[in-house]
């Protein structure tokens, strides 16, 4: 596990499986720290077979399209010419995939890379445009690498399966620890997708032959569905609705209205 810090659940896992689980403090926006995390995995476990670049943020105020660099809430630095949220949600998974493919290829071993996309890749939302853009990028990045699972026999290359889950509204700290986002959820109308459902879907992408490289698997409450590249019907069923999404859109209009007077 590589992240800035551990959640309590992850800490318990480390205690329960000290010889099988390892934590490496990592800022995923720093490529040298990602490199080090991969090296630690090689040193401690002799390598790896499955990679999940799962760190993500949901357009937080510190790196948000509607709060430009240099404004009060933003921590994006204008001179850096980059958005932290895109570094976390899009650039880091692409870089981690590059590193994993290099490892699997050199070792000539089967490998699996499971990404975290979202139903936001299919449904654009005015209040979180960078999140939607990043997740759409992840879905199409995964589809673009579909061919790695069946390299030409003449190349003698290892088979690498690259897939993604595209969950609905998951009950994680991305929502529960951010009151401004949690206010969009109507407990009487909206249903949560449990993290365990997403984990099981990810395991299926690794283990089941019915899923091939390039698969993007939508995960709702008690259901999954493959997302098609063309003419897809879009998210449906329980665990995909945010009834108060309009509140976030209203906030955008307020922000833009204030800019008229800045």
Image (cartoon, helix red, strand yellow):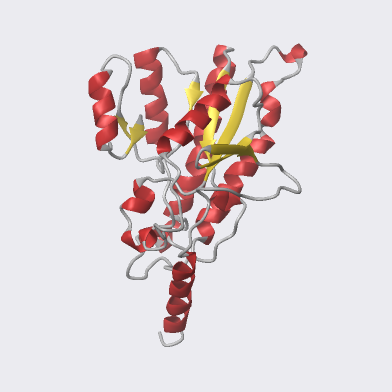
Using the image as rendered, state which of residue 262 and residue 240 is in the foreground.
Answer: 240
Q: Quadrant of residue 107?
A: top right
Extreme bottom residue here?
Answer: 261
Residue 203 lies, in percent from the top left, at 51, 25
Instruction: Give the number of marks.
Output: 0
- Judge from the rendering whether residue 255 lies leftward or rightward of residue 238; answer left or right: left
The quarter of the rendered structure image containing the C terminus is bottom left
Residue drawn at x 58%, y 37% is 224
Q: Is residue 168 above or below residue 96?
A: below
- Judge from the rendering whether residue 228 lies leftward or rightward of residue 117; answer left or right: right
Residue drawn at x 71%, y 47% is 232
The quarter of the rendered structure image containing the N terminus is top left
Residue 118 lies, in percent from the top left, at 54, 46
Q: Is residue 61 above or below residue 150?
A: below
Q: Quadrant of residue 223?
A: top right
Residue drawn at x 28%, y 33% is 9
Residue 115 lies, in percent from the top left, at 53, 36
Residue drawn at x 70%, y 42% is 228
Residue 184 lies, in percent from the top left, at 42, 62
Look at the image and tell me whether residue 200 can be seen: yes
Using the image as rendered, state which of residue 133 and residue 242 is in the foreground.
Answer: 242
- Judge from the rendering whether residue 190 lies leftward or rightward of residue 229; answer left or right: left
Look at the image and tell me whether residue 217 can be seen: no
Q: Is residue 103 above or below residue 78?
A: above
């Amino acid at each position: 596990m590589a992240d800035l810090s551990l959640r309590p659940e992850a800490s318990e896992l480390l205690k329960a499986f000290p010889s099988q689980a390892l934590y490496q403090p990592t800022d995923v926006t720093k490529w040298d720290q990602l490199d080090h995390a991969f090296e630690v995995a090689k040193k401690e476990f002799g390598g790896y077979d499955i990679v999940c670049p799962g760190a993500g943020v949901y357009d937080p105020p510190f790196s948000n399209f509607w709060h430009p660099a240099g404004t009060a809430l933003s921590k994006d630095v204008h001179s850096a010419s980059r958005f932290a949220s895109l570094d976390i949600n899009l650039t880091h998974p692409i870089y981690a995939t590059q590193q994993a493919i290099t490892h699997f290829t050199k070792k000539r071993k089967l490998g699996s890379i499971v990404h975290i996309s979202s139903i936001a890749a299919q449904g654009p939302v005015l209040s979180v445009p960078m999140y939607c853009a990043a997740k759409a990028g992840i879905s199409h990045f995964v589809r673009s690498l579909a061919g790695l699972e069946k390299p030409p026999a003449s190349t003698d290359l290892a088979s690498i399966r690259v897939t993604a889950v595209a969950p609905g509204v998951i009950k994680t700290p991305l929502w529960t620890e951010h009151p401004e986002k949690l206010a969009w959820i109507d407990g009487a109308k909206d249903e949560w997708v449990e993290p365990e459902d997403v984990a099981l879907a990810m395991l299926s992408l690794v283990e089941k032959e019915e899923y091939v490289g390039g698969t993007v698997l939508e995960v709702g409450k008690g259901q999954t569905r493959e997302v098609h590249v063309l003419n897809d019907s879009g998210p449906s069923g329980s665990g995909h609705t945010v009834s108060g999404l309009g509140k976030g859109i209203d906030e955008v209009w307020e922000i833009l209205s204030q800019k008229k007077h800045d």
